[in-house]
Amino acid sequence: MKKRILAILLALAMAFSVFALTACNGDEVIPPDDQIEDTTTPPPDTNDDNGDTEDPPPPPPEIEVGAMTEVGTLRSETLIVEYQFRPGNPGRFNPHMAGTSRGTGVHQFMWSHLYEINTSRGEQFPEIAADFPTSNEDFTVHTLPIREGMYWSDGMPITAHDVAYTFNLILTNEEHVHHASYNALLESVEATSDFEVTLVTNDPFPRIAQRFGVVLWGREMVIAPKHIFEAMENPVMDEFSDPVTSTAWVVHSFDPDGAWIRLDLREDWERSTTAVVMREVYGITDPPAARHIWMRSIGDDTARQMALINNEVDAMVEFTPEMMRFVTERNPNIEGWYGPYFPWGTSDDPCSKGLTFNAGVAPFDNPLMRWGLVLAIDFDEASMAVFEGIGRSSPLPFLTITGAAQEIYLRPMLPWLEALTVDPGDGGPPIPVWDGGYADRMAEIQRARGIDIPNDRATLDGMFGLGTWRYDPEGAMRLFEAAGLELRGDDWFFEGEPFVINMIAMADAEVQAGRTVLAAADQFRKFGFNVNVEEQISATWIDNNELGHFDITGSWPTMFVTQDIAADLQAGGWWVYEYPPIGESHHPGNMMRFGTPEIAAIVLEKQTIPPEDPRTFELAMEFLKLVTEEMPWVGFHGGIKFCPINTTYWTNWPSAENNYDGPWWWWSCFKYIAWQLQPTT
């Protein structure tokens, strides 16, 4: 049985880990290099040497009543949202075809899942499913009720037959990218009535809703219209450029060069999946005010900033602090998560950023070496170098410290963390490692910069976190020597050879991750290490992570959305503790090439226990403590996303004060946010 569980976990994790990594990237596939927008360009420089503004731009244009968009819609009825990535295959709207760029409006406004997620509450809710699954005693037979009263945009009802067809499409079509992982888990799927589906799993599996519903950015289990797909010659190779949709919107037109997609509200919007969920989950019966959705590519960073300032777009996917400062100073209607002022961005993106140590390479295979590097980092300085000190500290080696995770896991761990020490074994006293004063220090640093930071504890904890790891050069020196390093004059040696730390970072996306690597490299050089940093295009970076060609990389193997972290552990490959040699592929979720039998046993036990069982929380805490002691990955900040919105035309955006969901315009849950937006006039 254990071998069978391992096989299932491997197949599922390989599929989910790719999804999880790219989820925080914002799309299902990383586009070719020439299609990736550069998010690192600084804003135009309008300051002279004295800090005074020269020739500020004119005020933004006022609302023009009756104004039309370039795609022929009333501006006052049109929600304009930026793509994160311009699609390389315009008109490919089939979510089951490899290479479909789903974050361009495809999974936000065309398709539905069995279960969706509200990230602020950290809760899944049924979407096409009517309720959560019921299972037999050994969790091998699972019954899914399907909502009644939902219709495809061509007027056909959505039923259990569509759901069963979609599962079996994946199970039987070898060209589907999830064919192997589904067959490893599922024995059969059948529509036992018009509104009930029965799943039979090969082995006990208590997490059907997590596995086949949205827990992060989206999910491959997108329900397809059986009456359309079964008529296709090959449903996973048909682009479906004139799609029938399940949501409240339909595709009106799109640019053949990929610059934009226009979606319009269905005439029968009240029969869509979105409308039924809004009524039954949110209690909202009115139609959305956004009758048109215009998803578009804006251009380079200068064009993006000016489009936002000039009210030509309502929501952008990702800025930097420098860009946020520039646009908020020039248009009073532009805001971030915290409004038009510092710190602008949210720290609740589920993928925190930090440093991955390659445990397959000496001396990084030694936890004393890893802890030495952690204590060699002045986190105050490093934090300022990343995003000007913006962001909630997320130091644990696995868990992303979102606001929810901070209260559910980190705060209860504080007594243990405050007592945690690392013993170099040199006869000296053990080294304490926890620093609970980071938030107060960072608040003072920001106040000294002229930024108004509140004094209350809850706000400071939310902005900056509950603590991080100590900066302790003396302790770091003891740990390095215990790990076998030797300082000769100004140079470090290991096993008689000059010691060099080779670090890699993604150069063309994920600005926070890249800056984290550069900030850490500066800290290590300050300590006297010879550090080589190579910034690589995404494809090269991914290959080198997979093959282990690095000492330290800026990957993000952490997550957190729901209290039950079983799916996150599965995706991260934490049940694997034996790895092939450097240069050979391994489990794609675990760039660290790290594991222990004790940690693996916890993960395997957790997979067999239902999410609501109190034992799942106990196992999670055991796991967090064990992996923290080993420190294979150190976190800097939670995932910080600067996703500006413009309130000139639309209000009631989610924010820190109006926290009904997260600012995830590229996630599948955006359709429920868009529905709740209200016109300004």
Image (cartoon, rainbow, N blue to C red):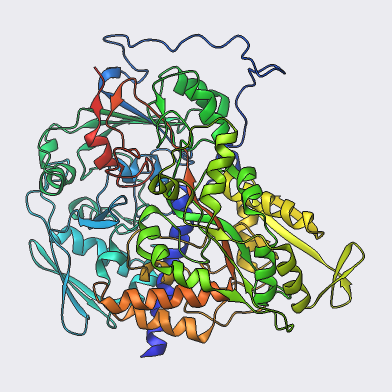
Quarter of the picture containing the C terminus is top left
Q: Position of residue 359 (x, y in %)?
A: 64, 74
Q: Is residue 613 left or right of residue 102?
A: left
Horizontal arrangement in the rendering, residue 283 relative to residue 104 (left or right): left
Residue nearer the viewer, 492 or 125: 492
Examine the image and state in which quarter residue 663 appears: top left
User: Residue 543 at what x, y percent from top left?
Assistant: 62, 61
The answer to whether residue 418 is seen in the rendering is yes
**Residue 503 placed where, x, y %?**
71, 58
Depth check, front residue: 433 or 3: 433
Q: Is residue 431 left or right of residue 576?
A: right
The residue at the point 24 percent across, 50 percent down is 112
Residue at the outermost right position: 489
Height in image: 590 above or below 619?
above
Q: Note whether 194 is above or below 277 in the view shown.
A: below
Q: Position of residue 383 (x, y in %)?
A: 60, 48
The quarter of the picture where the N terminus appears is: bottom left
Image point (73%, 63%), residue name: 473
Figure disc tally: 0
Task: Name the residue located 8 percent from the left edge and 61 percent from the top edge.
Answer: 195
Q: Residue furthest bottom?
A: 1
Is residue 37 at all visible to an observer of this figure?
no
Viewer-side residue, 110 vs 50 = 50
